[in-house]
Amino acid sequence: QLHDLSDPEVTRALAFNIDWHYALDITDESDDGKYLSDRTLRTYRKILMDERLDRLLFETLTDALIEAFGVDTSKQRLDSTIIRSNMRKLGRIRICAATIRKFLKKLKRTHKEWYDSHLTADVTDRYLAKNADSLFSQVKPSETSRTLQDIGNDLVHLIEVFSPYETVCVWPEYRLLERVLHEQFTVTGSGSDTQVTVKPPKDVSSDSLQNPSDTTAGYDAHKGSGYQAQIMETYRTDKHDKHTPDLITYTEVEPANKPDVYGLLPAIDATSKRGCCPATLVCDTQYGSDDNVVKATARDVEVTAPSKGNAPVSTTCLGDFVFNPDTSTVIACPEGHAPEWSVHTTKARLKATFAKTVCRDCPRHNLCPVYHGKKASYLYYDVAKVRIAQRRAIEQTPKFKDTYRWRAGIEGTHSHLKSDLGARRLRVRGLAAVCFAVSLKALGLNILRCAQALI
């Protein structure tokens, strides 16, 4: 993974490359000592993937490098990057057609008698002809809806015909037919009254099937189809220290449709168990939800991330009020006036009441978020809004800006993984194989950085 080699290139390097012999301490010059078959390589890789030993390798060796080089893990940054598996980018028509083709090929190979007796030639030729793929790829835009409708009818027909056969119903290929029908079409009625309607693109879920050959990949409107890798690494603010590397401490691969907001707490928990949890974690807006910040603070981690959404248009906002840090009740308004009382209306909602005469003569009268009633002026708010308002006030300080600017450095790590170690488009498909490749490529980048630090 470090050199982004294919299996034949690995076996050849093991046999003839003296650099590999030195690194692996191979002193035996016989053919037996330097030969590895492709089958053995595939077998041991499968064992590593099944037992998740790639994760163990990454964590164990990274922790050893952190200790050996004295890497400070108190400051870290987190971001995700898109990873493409070895899958074709297909449109809706070709996804449906490829799913049907995959099912028909297995049916023909394993149960030829059912294939011949239950299917007509016009259905089989449409999907198994030599030029079937090119025909579906050349559908005119004006014919897209009609072609999708025909494919939807074929999906319903295949599912209904083979649903009585338990042997077929447990096939992954048959379950893919059901999944594609559910995700791409709406089926109403039953029997001869069955009606199939193509779903509008906006109604197709982001976790829908992207390619029958890689069923675990997802789709994100911004990033595209494939997977995303959550990467967390240390960073140094002293750039004169050339002998302490920045190391990746955490990796996790997810379908591309999974929101980044769910990636922060698992990263903190995973590094806490290994003793390399950050005290300050810098990340972008998607990770910095109020719930994440509160839970990270409870874990003694300070999350530096911009708050989501736009600040209120009014000149005076909730962050300008003074609050009791324990009860979140208002102590004073921006002009220094204390409320007549401040109470919890519900568990999370609060209300502060100010004298009407005080607010009426206030220079911020028309700019303040308080509501002016008949008897008094009221400020309605909740605890979460207080925290967000206070965060927005902190975001304007030089300290926040100086800390947050270090987040951009992780984009260079993503670039190194993709350009130097081949993580942009992998040779494999499936979540387990992609996790294996990304974990070992991240470990390889850590080794390269440590080697560079020794120069």
Image (tube, grey):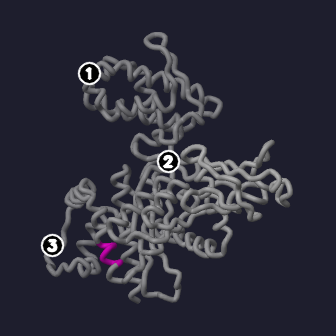
> How far across and how far down the image is residue 94, in percent?
50, 37
- The answer to whether any part of residue 72 appears in the image is yes
Residue 257: image tag: 2
Q: Up-down: is 1 above or below 113?
A: below
> How far across and how far down the image is residue 64, in percent?
30, 76
- N-terminal of the pair, mark 1 or mark 3, is 3
| Left or right for 143, reference 163 | right
Give the SS element for disc 2.
Answer: loop
Say if mark 1 contacts mark 3, CB within 8 Å. no
CA separation, marks 1 and 3?
A: 50 Å
Q: Nearer the viewer, mark 2 or mark 1?
A: 2
> How far across and how far down the image is residue 247, in percent?
41, 74
For mark 3, what is the residue? 31
For mark 1, what is the residue? 113
Q: Nearer the viewer, mark 2 or mark 3?
A: 2
Give the SS element for disc 1.
Answer: helix
Furthest residue toward front: 340
Identify residue type, mark 1.
Answer: Glu
Magenta stretch, residue numbers: 61-66
